[in-house]
Image (spheres, rainbow, N blue to C red):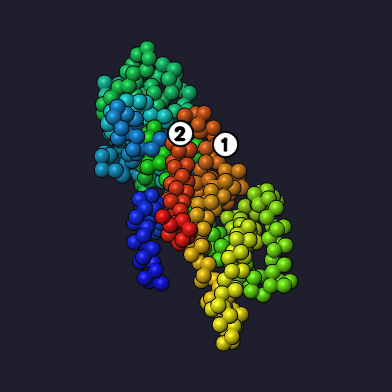
Amino acid sequence: MKEKLKSTFVELKEYPTAVFGLLVIFMLILLAFYSVFTIPYSEAIRMWRGDPGTWDRAPRYARPAWLNLMPGINLPETITIGSDSEKAEKTVTSVGDEISEVRIALPFTFDYDAFPPELSVFIRASYRQRRPWARISWHTPDGREVEIADRSLRSGEWLRLSQDEGLRGELWGNPAHVGLFMVPLSRAPEIQKGKYKLLLEGYLLEEDAELDVELVVYGRVHGAAGTDHRRRSLAVALMWGTPIALAFAFLAAVGSTITTMFIAAAGVWFGGLIDAAVQRITEVNMILPALPIMIMIGTLYSRSIWVMLAVVIILGLFSAGIKTYRAVFLQVKESAYIEAATAYGAGNFRILTRYMIPKVLPMLVPQFVVLIPSFVFLEATLAVLGLGDPLLPTWGKVLNDAHQQDALLNGHYYWVLMPAVLLILTGFGFAMVGFALDRIFNPRLRS
């Protein structure tokens, strides 16, 4: 077996497409292991569900951050600065019995060529009964000061400045994420680049009270793969979709090919009613529409990926491959070494596993490799149709969400292109390796 594998890899090197396909498969496997070890399963599910507080600091519909590497593109990236960051300036001064004056300055530089899509301030106040009071102001590079809030603060507040209609009135009818960054009174909003500052000045009315503030200037680019309509990072789904797709496809391919081959071999060897029953079941199964059956099960019973995997394997047990394997096994059964094995008293199981099936394994390997991308596409198809596992982040789920949110119509091409490219690369990689293996193992295709 070792020598056979070595010679197979030596022959694969003669096919450049197969080498490229192996590199693609290796990169996919590497990404799958990296995803599993860096993002635990429970954490990936929590992040993809978008639990409160998970993606509050991420923008909606942001493009991938690597777009800024292209010439002439300088879109704003997300800027997050809190009172506990190194750039922040926080001072707390006692001014009386249980009363302290707090001053927090959050300076940052904005030098991008577009306005941010949103602007928010997160406030965390710790107190027993008496709420802290604070005044929050915005300072621009040209020395202007705009008051944002002046009131008592609750324990946790999210000031969505972009939706503040009162603030819009002070900014010449522009939303905060435009008016606070524009040159004053410019006809067409013009970006004012430079150093900005958010300033909080207030009082803590209890001895052990605390007050922290965090400013988030949302970007138009974010992360390695961008974000969707729920502020979720698409990188999570693209990364975790890799091990899910490969595991689903591998298990489905193993269950439907090896079992099918064993059933075909048993039918040929035992013959009679067993062979006839196998052939009749196969013929009935061949006319059953697999996809509508899976749609029905997903709609009426369960959309769990494991239920779908079980259905795929069951429907693949008596697939059309049994007919092909049966034709080959009929020839193998008449071989002299089978007759010799029977003569010295070899059992049925030994004949099937040691003498018949190994002769057909070279046919199985290319078919097995080519089947894997077909099951990857099947899992993605089910998800695109809305029948994917609702908990798992997969490539098909990303495409389904993009379709529901009209991503292409709204210009969010990255949302569709990245999972589509991964699906195409997966299919291309396994197909190129499978075609090369078919030429190696099939003597009729050798040049």
Amino acid type shown at disc 1: Gln
Choose top left, top right, bottom left or bottom right for residue 89: top left
Q: Position of residue 352 (x, y in %)?
A: 58, 75
Question: Would you say 23 lies left or right of 439 here?
Answer: left
Question: Would you say 84 lies left or right of 261 here?
Answer: left
Choose top left, top right, bottom left or bottom right for residue 179: top left
Residue visible at 32% across and 41% down?
Answer: 83
Amino acid type shown at disc 2: Tyr
Residue visible at 53% across and 76% down?
Answer: 355
Question: Would you say 10 lies left or right of 257 here?
Answer: left
Name the quarter where the N terminus is drawn: bottom left
Q: Secondary structure at mark 2?
A: loop
Q: Nearer the viewer, residue 328 or 129?
A: 328
Name the quarter where the C terminus is drawn: bottom left
* Residue of label 1: 404
Dot in front, 2 or 1: 2
* Residue of label 2: 413
